[in-house]
Amino acid sequence: MERWKTIVEPFRIHSVEPIRLKTVEQRDIALREAGWNLFGVHAEDVIIDLLTDSGTGAMSRDQWAGIQRGDESYAGSPSWYAFLESVQALFPFRHVIPTHQGRAAEKILFSAIGGPGKSIPNNTHFDTTRANVEYTGAEAVDLVIPEGRVPSLLHPFKGNMDVAALEVFLAERGADNVPAVFVTITNNSGGGQPVSLANLHAVRAVCDRFGVPLFLDACRFAENAWFIHEREEGQSGRPIVDIVREMASLADGMTMSAKKDGMANIGGWLAVNDDALAERCRNLLILTEGFPTYGGLAGRDLEAIAQGLREVVDEDYLRYRIGSTACLGDALVESGIPIVRPVGGHAVYIDARALLPHIDPLQYPGQALAIALFREGGIRGCEIGTVMFGRHPDGTETPAAMDLVRLAIPRRTYTQSHIDYVIEVVRWVAERGSDLRGYRIAEEPRSLRHFTARFEPLD
Ligand SMILES: Cc1ncc(COP(=O)(O)O)c(C=O)c1O
């Protein structure tokens, strides 16, 4: 297939879902009712939903067959063993603790290891990861390489951890106050950028020197492995599964949302090697999620994940997946639209601060752009910027490091003509960017405000 330019989806469509083609006037009403928060919009008012790639993908024929096989025994279900075998084939950690999604794994782990006075470094914390760390009273610190903070700068592994900064951090805080080092693969909040194997080895070496465990936030592990396969010296001949196992071998544990590279609509897990930590986490699991052989999941969900993990490491799938995201990003670059470069795995991130320099970061350029894409073309993206990260636990507000709009591509869900439509709408909005105005927040909750805040347009 490498002879041809056209991206061929490595699947045929087996059943279809209608998309309702609503008008700008209908979307204006929807926006007003939702307080200009796209999380509050009815999904039927959306034409192309790029809010998230989390749990929004299409499942395969074989995953649906697995759902039929799902065994709902409370304890020791065959579906649990199918799940466990699939997880450990890629991530051979001693203890696998199923949860209903990634943040439940985070909540359990940080309840066990966090607390006041503790610090967790990460390349970049995802929003729920940061919130779960901070909820325990601990501090969440981002230590991505400096290149990872400059949207236009090209670097093959822009998600890498700044190893020198990590070393200084551990020396200053002391190993006793850092219960774990985290690396997020790929780095979602930093533009879906990958982390190299060399960087993971270097982080591991620092963790070993200080005696601190290393955890992966592995939501997009297969996409990260594909980038390693394509970009890292000496890796192109290796099967994806081998690369995944090597990443896993460098860590002491992981948190996972199966809604991403688990190819399922729900699910997650926490995995650790430490027996005592596993016991503490399982006790918390029983309090909040369920018995350790199903966590927060039905047997049928466990089967869907077991099969999804076999499909996600397929090279034809990963070539199409990363190629389709790159096709959207490259078209925007050709039109002079500033995006985080190089294009990441699951999403294209438009640099709203650069595109809309007339909107002050505290008037939320990312929110203004996301609203315009929805209003004009029914495309729902997600602000990743000052709305999401600008409010701090002490109540102060400062501009986030970047103001981005993420267009996340659900797995195996949209065709190339849907992507072409997105390109057309983004170009149209970008050409008229100087007409856009900022927003103010009228109401917001104490944390994770981007989900429920209500906005008002500024004149
Ligand atoms: C990097 C990362 N970590 C953690 C999570 C949380 O996973 P979940 O949405 O399943 O709770 C996400 C979700 O988007 C993520 O992208």
Image (cartoon, rainbow, N blue to C red):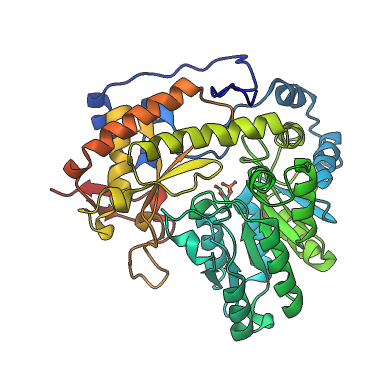
371 displayed left or right of 345: left
Horizontal and vertical percent position of residue 311? 73, 32
At a point 80% along the width and 63% down the height, the residue shown is: 279
Along the viewing direction, whichever of 65 and 308 lies nearer the viewer: 308
Above/below status of 316 relative to 338: above
Q: Is residue 161 visible?
A: yes
Total marks in image = 0
* Residue 33 horizontal/vertical position (percent): 27, 36
Q: Is residue 356 above or below residue 281?
A: above
Q: Quadrant of residue 254?
A: bottom right
- Considering only vertical position in the picture, is 40 above or below 385? above
Give the image location of residue 111, x and y in percent. 64, 66
| Residue that sits furthest to the front in the current view | 3
From the viewer's perspective, tell me whether residue 220 is left or right of residue 41. Answer: right
Q: Residue 88 or 451: which is nearer the viewer?
A: 88
Q: Nearer the viewer, residue 431 or 141?
A: 431
**Residue farthest to the left, as pictured:** 459
Task: Quadrant for residue 19, please give it.
Answer: top left
Q: Determine whether, in the image, residue 165 is placed left or right of residue 212.
A: left
Q: Quadrant of residue 116?
A: bottom right
State which quarter of the image contains the N terminus: top right
15 over 336 or under it: above or below? above
Q: Residue at x 70, y 40 (%)?
A: 297
Identify which residue is drawn at 36% across, 40% down.
38
* Residue 437 location (% of width, % of height): 19, 47
| Residue 409 visible, this orientation | no
